[in-house]
Amino acid sequence: METNLIFHRNFAGMEKQLQRYRFPVFPQDVDGKQHLRMVALESCILNTAGLAAAENGFGSVDMINEGVTWVLSRLAIEMRSLPEQYTDMYIETWVEDYGRLLTTRNFTVYDHEDRPIGHACSLWALMDMKTRRPVNLQTHPDLQRFANGVPSPIAKPDKIGAVQGEPKAEHRVSYSDIDFNGHTNSMKYVEWMLDAYPIERLYERRIRRFELNYQHEALHGEQVRICWEDSEGQTAFAVQSADGKDFCRARIVWGNAWE
């Protein structure tokens, strides 16, 4: 997707910047009901995070040069409506805080008329590329100046419990699944999980809240299986290895169908 930086603005009484980007919605981004697909929305959200971090000097290339890389740990998305095909949406982002191992980055999504239509909250870790272990963020005090303490309007993503459902689909991790870190791209897990779910159920309801927990890296050539189980008003998913180790868990809270 094409992205343009629109503007920076400051929160009232704060020096910290709010960064905003434009994303056109193309036909490949919508489903058979002309609704923006969740994987396309997550892609825009994560691209917003990457663009903002790069502009502030701590993007993926900058950090890789230091021997570390950003890893998405958890993500929550809530949408009231979805952009239409061939319209623009705008995503604003800011860093809320930096803990010892996790930092919180928040987002607000706007439609083409600049109306807020959703929010997202993400938790990120900084990983040492040699040891594959998390880095203490307090050893990077230069990052602290970007945190403004402003919370997201939605709850932070929670820990998702184990999924008991039987495997519904399988997939072998291939070339198109791998990102520059050498492991499966974050959006691919979402794609696999929703592809394994009955399409008629996706069309008859809307995703009110979508949560993701990323736990382990799926590597090229690995055989993965996708499990899901329905409960009252929600569905839990897991992408697992052949021996049952969870790579990613997700939870959807369902609402009424989109108008």
Image (cartoon, grey):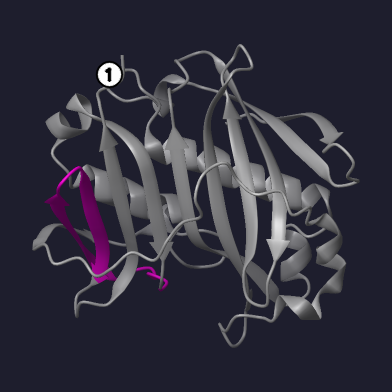
Position above or below: 250 against 82: below
Q: Residue at x 65, y 49 (%)?
A: 151
Q: Which residues are magenta?
A: 216-240
Q: Is residue 229 left or right of residue 174?
A: left
Closer-to-camera residue (169/95) = 95
Position above or below: 145 against 94: below
Q: Position of residue 227 (x, y in %)?
A: 17, 60
Q: Is residue 174 left or right of residue 107?
A: left
Position above or below: 84 against 146: above
Q: Is residue 181 left or right of residue 173?
A: right
Q: Position of residue 194 (x, y in %)?
A: 26, 44
Estimate how packed mark 1 is, as few (under 14), some (14 to 19) or many (20 or more) residues with alpha carbons within 10 Å: few
Magenta stretch: dominant secondary structure: strand
Residue 145, located in which quarter of the rendered image? Answer: bottom right
- Which residue was labeled with disc 1? 33
Disc 1 secondary structure class: loop
Which residue in the rendered view is the most extreme toward the left? 166
The image quadrant where one finds the N terminus is: top right
Residue flagged by tag 1: what amino acid is it?
Lys
Q: Residue at x 17, y 44 (%)?
A: 197
Q: Position of residue 68 (x, y in %)?
A: 69, 74
Q: Residue at x 59, y 14 (%)?
A: 112
Q: Position of residue 163 (x, y in %)?
A: 20, 65
Which residue in the rendered view is the most extreme toward the front? 13
Position above or below: 21 against 179: above
Count of numbered circles in the view: 1
Residue 111 belongs to magenta span: no
The image quadrant where one finds the C terminus is: top left
